[in-house]
Amino acid sequence: MLTCIGGALLGALVFLFARTETIDFRGDAQALSLLREMKDFDARRDSDALRLANDLAGTAIGIPDRGPAIYRIMRELEQGPARDAVAAQLPALRAGMAEKEAAYDTLKRAHAESMAAYKEADEALAALTAPAAGARARGSERASALIAIAERLRSALQNSDVETTEENLRELDRRAATLLPAALATDPFLAEPARHAEAALRNFSAARGREALAWRKLSFMTVGGRISLTASTLARSIENALDEKDRWRVYLFAYGIALVIGVGYLGVRTVGTLRDLRHANDDLERRSSERARDLAQTLRQLQDSESQLVQSEKMSSLGQLVAGVAHEINRPLGFVRSSLSNARGGIARLRELDVHATRLVELHRAHDTDPLDLDRAVATLAARLAQLRSENVLDDLEALSWDGLKGVEQVVELVANLKSFSRLDRSRVASFNVNDGVHAALLIAKPLLRKVDVEKSLGDVPSITCSPSQVNQVLLNLVTNAAQSIDKPRGRITVTTRHPTPGAIAIDIADNGKGIAAEALPRIFDPFFTTKESGQGTGLGLSIAHKIVLQHGGRIDVRSQVGVGSTFTVTLPLQPPPETGSHSDAAHNLHA
């Protein structure tokens, strides 16, 4: 009887536990990720369409074909274990994607027609301008007006923005209508080129209008909204499944409590066993206390070791950057030295001129001066002055002095930024503008950015209350990691500052490096974890940056794609976290 009861209780426990663990969200998570990836590709194709429509210069803008990637995602969605709510939306998504692909092909054909019309109109205007220029050379004032009209029309062709096409084309047609009257007023022989140019302009206007219509049709398509709606539906389905799982966990918890009560009731009837258990528990507590003391001591040792390793990493990074900055300082110093060396030659020439001028003054002041001596002194001084002017000695001295001063200012700027990064008051909390930190970090990291194009998009962000040196260290670590991740002959790093919410600022540091694999993303902030080759990193840079940002009450978000690049977003509050209390408390917490 007792065996049956125990088996039934155990079976119920296993059933409840199984209900809390059998729900698998891997397929749903994969489908949700694919929908977000599709949304990203769709947004990029919209951007590609705008770039294509606004490219009238004929340059190769290298727009990739995003269709295969989108259809690859569609195949994975259709073949994957998606929920019914997602599967029902897939036919509409495929049809919408096909319709948008057709609209994109239509836009490309319309753009090709616009390009051909643009070239024809430009050549026609050039053919009209050439004889008009000849007429202007013969003294025709009306030819100048005709040339000005033609040049304004060529400029209007180049500035034809697809987003404001209707207004631009109306203005283009209005100006084109003035070509023939101006040509007839200048020279009747210019009438035929003017008619040809006007016809080419109207042809371009019609082609550009068709292209603008194709672009608007593409931009107004709602397939992106359908993707977002499908993703929202899937997310709600996952949330409902999680809610169900939580309900079974509540049942399991309640059942566990009931089992504990039953075990307690049985325990009352086994006093002797409890006595033995009490003794065993006392012994266990004693051992646990000893183990806890050992663990506490081990934890303190690990914390001390971690602090030493973190400080070692900071000093190692600073040492590497100082070595690079030392090279940057040597360049302007060498330039200053060369300028001063060249300036010494010019000063010697001025001293020689001073000797001749002094001689002339002495002869002029003397009462018994021989006029011939005075004339010779004047002639000698005039010759020296003429020689100095012909050799531009004074201009060269002025240029050398300005160049030397510029080199010294570069050295002063480098030294000031080094001092900002290496000062000891790292726990000081002050008002700080992150735009200044970005400039300083890029200047300090300049040796690593020689083969990298740096783009800065610094917004009008408010100052924050923080430890400036620690925020500078975060920026420097992220810029350094971005530079080291670039494996292309010419890389690009984009640094953006913005004010996304009233209570916070954000810094985006994006690169086009090799990116981070998806399986490595959850571990990149772990101490000693690195994606670099052996011997090229300690794995503490991102860990230190993450710790500093968390202590400031902020967060770091990462977006990365292998072969495309990574974007690190640092979000910091305008004020320290509320739990830090006063500024002195904040300083202590930030320094800990």
Image (cartoon, helix red, strand yellow):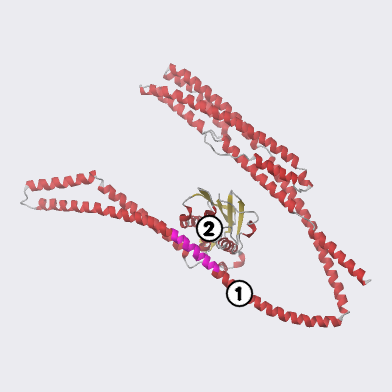
Classify 229 as above or below 569. Answer: above
Residue 87 position in % (x across, y down): 77, 44
Please identify the residue farthest to the top as the structure is shown: 188
Residue 480 position in % (x across, y down): 52, 57
Residue 409 visible = no
Q: Amino acid at mark 1?
A: Arg
Q: Which residue is rendered at x = 46% and y = 58% of the image?
A: 444
383 or 28, which lies in front? 28
Residue 300 — which label? 1
Highlighted range, magenta: 309-324
Q: Is residue 101 magenta?
A: no
Q: Amino acid at mark 2?
A: Leu
28 or 208, which lies in front? 28
Residue with the mark numbered 2: 475
188 or 529, which lies in front? 529
Image quadrant assignment for residue 94: top right
Residue 225 visible = yes
Does the magenta stretch mainly form a helix, a strand or a loop?
helix
